Amino acid sequence: MEKIIYQNQLIKVEIEPFEIPWLKIFTIDRIKEFSECSKKIQFEILEVLNIIEIEMLEYFKPTKVNIASFGNYVPHVHFHIQARFENDSFFPEPTWGKKQREAKLKLLDFDIFYLNIKLKLEKRSLSNG
Amino acid sequence: MEKIIYQNQLIKVEIEPFEIPWLKIFTIDRIKEFSECSKKIQFEILEVLNIIEIEMLEYFKPTKVNIASFGNYVPHVHFHIQARFENDSFFPEPTWGKKQREAKLKLLDFDIFYLNIKLKLEKRSLSNG
């Protein structure tokens, strides 16, 4: 599957390949801070974040969803959305924290999940005109 | 200064005492995931997050603002908002990551910043009726 699964005029959604399901929402414009985004872009991030999180919860039934926006290395607004599991390598620490164990994860197919997200976002674009 | 600097029917804002300016927005209701929050609560989090971030950028002029919502230890929706500086202990890693150095920070008074946020949020409550 391609890394960028969806893109419109405001945002794009990218896969972060890892042991857990992990998507990133980037603004198209190179904006540094979230509060510098227009309301339109902020609401778009919010809507796409909700779509991703709801599908994540339904499909993978994770222990918790994690959301983060740092941008210390890449000062371009992007949000991470991750499905976390109590037996993943870092739980309950963030994946940026100390590794806790060797993960033994048996998860459903990631590509089907990413494809579902892609289709949901494309369908929404169509119905939004 | 008290730890909880602001509270309304939807959210509360709490200080996380640390070497950098750090505030947390909690939902009042014990909701586990962000997508399980009502639109009203989500928009309230968004608005308060913007107010905090804008004030952080103006007052401290940080290198970057970091936003995160994990809840792996405490499964109750809360967002961290942090002002990050290139010479803080963890930069460019998240504060949940590996410590990089002993911080040498000379920052403006935190209490004045927290008081400004408190006043801005209280003023907004009044004008919202």
Image (cartoon, coloured by chain):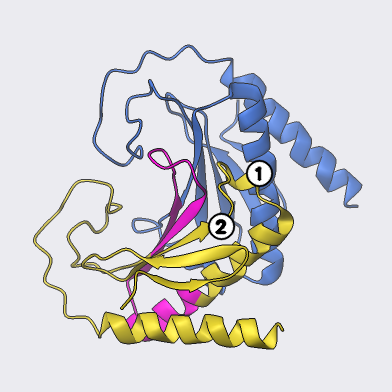
Chain colours: A yellow, B blue
Near-viewer residue (B53 or B126): B53
Of circles 1 and 2, which is in front? 2
The x, y position of residue A77, in whole percent, is 52, 49
Q: Which residue is mark 2?
A: A28
Q: Check disc 2: other Cα within 10 Å, few if <14, some if 14-19, many if 20+.
A: some
Q: Residue at x 48, y 11 (%)?
A: B106
What's under tag 1, amino acid-wise?
Answer: Glu
Query: Quarter holding the C terminus of chain A?
Result: bottom right
The x, y position of residue A49, in whole percent, is 53, 68
Question: Does dot 1 land on a helix, a strand or a loop?
Answer: helix
Q: Is residue B10 visible?
A: no
Tell whether label 2 touches label 1 (CB within 8 Å).
no
The x, y position of residue A110, in whole percent, is 28, 80
Residue A63 lies in magenta, yes or no?
yes
The x, y position of residue B114, in whole percent, is 64, 28
Q: Which mark is residue B94?
A: none
Distance from the alpha carbon under mark 1 to that under mark 2:
13 Å
Position above or below: A113 against B92: below
Q: Residue at x 67, y 27 (%)?
A: B58
Is B119 left, or right, of B7 in this rendering?
A: right
The magenta span reads A52-81
Q: Residue at x 82, y 47 (%)?
A: B125
Position above or below: A41 against B86: below
Q: Is residue A15 visible?
A: yes
Q: Which mark is residue A36?
A: 1
Position above or below: A65 against B114: below
Near-viewer residue (A3 or A63): A3
What's under tag 2, amino acid-wise?
Answer: Ile
Query: Quarter holding the N terminus of chain A?
Result: bottom left
Near-viewer residue (A106 or B38): A106
**Chain letter of the residue beneath label 2 in the structure image:** A
